[in-house]
Image (tube, rainbow, N blue to C red):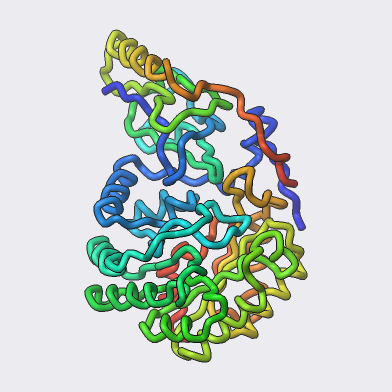
Amino acid sequence: MPVYTPTRLRRTGCPAAAKPPWLVTAAPQPSVMERMTRALEQGRLSTVCEWAVCPNIGECYSRGTATFLILGRVCTRHCAFCPLATGGPGEPDAAEPERVAQMVRSLRLEHVVITSVTRDDLPDGGAGHFAATVLAIKKICRGTSVEVLIPDFQGSRRAVATVTGAGPDVIGHNVETVPRLYPAVRPGAGYRRSLDLLALVKQTAAGVRTKSGLMLGLGETEDELKRTMRDLRRAGCDFLTLGQYLQPDENHHPVVAWITPEQFGLYRDVALDLGFKQVLSSPLARSSYRAGEMFRRGLPL
Amino acid sequence: MAHSLCMPKLGATMEQGLIVEWYRHEGESIHEGDFLVEVLTRKASFKVQSPLTGTVYKILAAAGSIVKVGLPLAVLAGAGDEEAVLHRVAGEAERLWTGSEITPEVYACPVDPPH
């Protein structure tokens, strides 16, 4: 695998400048940031863009799009890559689905991605809240396609049926990394459980597009990545995203490797050869990055 | 019109940012939209654009400084700005640093850069 040498480190004398230049993005203009922040505050809504400090926030907010984070901002798991707080979340806000729908309408989104923290504390894992959000959007935003990026619901068939029953257009669930790294990266999750969840979605709703994503640079090998891609295809996964892992802070899993754009390009070719319908593979690719374009290009299956 | 370029808030949990590199230096001409400075949050790196066409009058936070969100990084001069006005704006901007909980310091990388 090609190794990135941080030449900027020497030029600036600043250790943090070791980050490769291809990962540096344009900050949103203050007016763009203020407008979106105000709208979100008024709607009492959160975006994963802001809470996960996404590098694409400038591009997405400038285009007037965002990925909504429902069911609170406190997670019941403690994954080593995620900056969201861990602990005991409160009761779901029953009015949140309606507010999300209103925001989607006000932003005039053609495609929206909804995701959440993992809610192992709830009997249905939050599946009902996801379904209510999808239905609320579909009710007042006709023509808007809805993508949900769901937790594993601890493998619950009933939870999956609840979500698919609401009729989302895309159901995503990220495997995040290769199985060997699960104990270190996703200690509360199971690789097989995540694959089974994706397969279950297809069994439950054959027409829905399924999607998954991995973060690269956590220490996976090329062979492990290719095996994981094959596993995802066997689970019927349609769309794939591959992006560079970024460490939220020193308390999280370190970045083991900077994967070059060229290497991401090679992985995209491998994924397409394996039969994924759509693949987004680049350093700054994220699960919901340009999701609308991926969905539209992926029609029909 | 003289403008204080401040450390932007680029995420809900962002409280401070590191100045990685200035792309433009004091006295250089700039255009609206030009990338002026690279800022590192704990996770991501961003290039901050110039909001105006003019010159970089004064840089207040050198590369390697950690700066609290909202504090001024530089003073930018627009066309026709008088020296006296710029001097006053720069003075006001520098005073904002006084009493700040976070003072400029050289960043210590918490982990070895990956290979």
Seen as rendered, the residue at the extreme top is B84
Q: Is residue A278 visible?
A: no
Q: Give the percent coordinates (x, y) of residue A225.
A: 71, 69
Residue at image x 48%, y 49%?
A53
- Marker count (numbered): 0
On screen, residue B18 above or below A186 = above
Work out whether residue B10 or residue A263 is closer to the camera in this orientation and state it. B10
On screen, residue A170 above or below B40 = below
Work out whether residue A162 or residue A262 is closer to the camera in this orientation and state it. A162
Compared across the picture, whether A270 is left or right of B87 comes to right
On screen, residue B35 above or below B77 = below
Q: Can residue A55 be seen in this view?
A: yes
Quarter of the image for residue A297 reads: bottom left
Residue at image x 48%, y 82%?
A160
Q: Quadrant of the N terminus of chain B?
A: top left
Residue at image x 39%, y 45%?
A28
Q: Give the percent coordinates (x, y) of residue A187.
A: 66, 63
Quarter of the image for residue A66 reads: bottom left
Q: Give the percent coordinates (x, y) of residue A82.
A: 56, 55
